[in-house]
Image (cartoon, grey):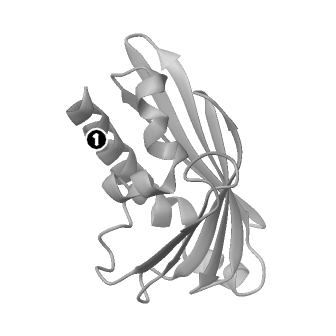
């Protein structure tokens, strides 16, 4: 499999305008990201604007947390946020990632999608590991935690 796509969505009973601010700024991810608890001593660095296009986040942690950077490369408030996610450890990879916020009934359907290519070591890894199974559960956990943060605010 040369490419992959992992996508999860969740209904959050709030308007997109209440959810979007929790995703558009990386400092807010501390409250809901499924990976924040993996390494209590993880190093974080923020650069660029606090939120929106150009906002950057870098992390460096233990073997499970790995290391990499994220940058918001496009945003249409309150419907879409596109990120450039780059892993430097444990494997090098660039994974375009998108959040969409679509009104649905009394709330919003939030979809989190990550795409990538299986090259080099990742191609061999893909023979044994399914990226959907590897990351999908984290996306589900993150969306549930995002919903809880939004609910606590409203």
Q: Which residue is mark 1?
A: 149
Query: Percent from the top left, x then y, of residue 72?
Result: 66, 52
Residue nearest the viewer, comparing 25 with 118: 25
Quarter holding the N terminus?
A: bottom right
Residue nearest the viewer, comparing 4 with 115: 115
Position of 80 relative to 45 (above/below):
above
Query: Percent from the top left, x then y, of residue 104?
Result: 47, 15
Query: Percent from the top left, x then y, of residue 68?
Result: 59, 76
Q: Residue at x 31, y 34 (%)?
A: 150
Position of 110 relative to 89 (above/below):
above
Res 45 visible: yes
Query: Percent from the top left, x then y, of residue 20?
Result: 49, 34
Q: Quadrant of residue 40?
A: bottom left
Q: Residue at x 49, y 56 (%)?
A: 26
SS category of the residue bearing label 1: helix
Residue nearest the viewer, comparing 48 with 136: 48
Q: Residue at x 43, y 84 (%)?
A: 61
Q: Residue at x 34, y 52 (%)?
A: 32
142 sits to left or right of 97: left
Quarter holding the C terminus?
A: top left
């Amino acid at each position: 499999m040369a490419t992959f796509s992992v996508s999860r969505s969740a209904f959050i009973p709030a308007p997109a305008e209440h959810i979007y601010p929790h995703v558009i700024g990386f400092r807010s991810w501390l409250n809901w990201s499924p990976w924040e608890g993996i390494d209590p001593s993880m190093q974080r660095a923020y650069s660029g604007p606090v939120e929106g296009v150009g906002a950057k986040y870098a992390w460096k942690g233990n073997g499970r947390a790995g290391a990499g950077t994220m940058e918001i490369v496009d945003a249409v408030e309150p419907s879409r946020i596109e990120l450039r996610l780059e892993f430097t450890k444990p494997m090098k990879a660039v994974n375009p990632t998108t959040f969409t916020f679509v009104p649905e009934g009394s709330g919003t359907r939030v979809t989190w999608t990550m795409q990538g290519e299986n090259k080099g070591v990742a191609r061999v890894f893909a023979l044994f590991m399914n990226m959907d199974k590897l990351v999908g559960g984290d996306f589900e956990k993150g969306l549930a935690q995002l919903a809880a943060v939004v609910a606590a605010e409203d």
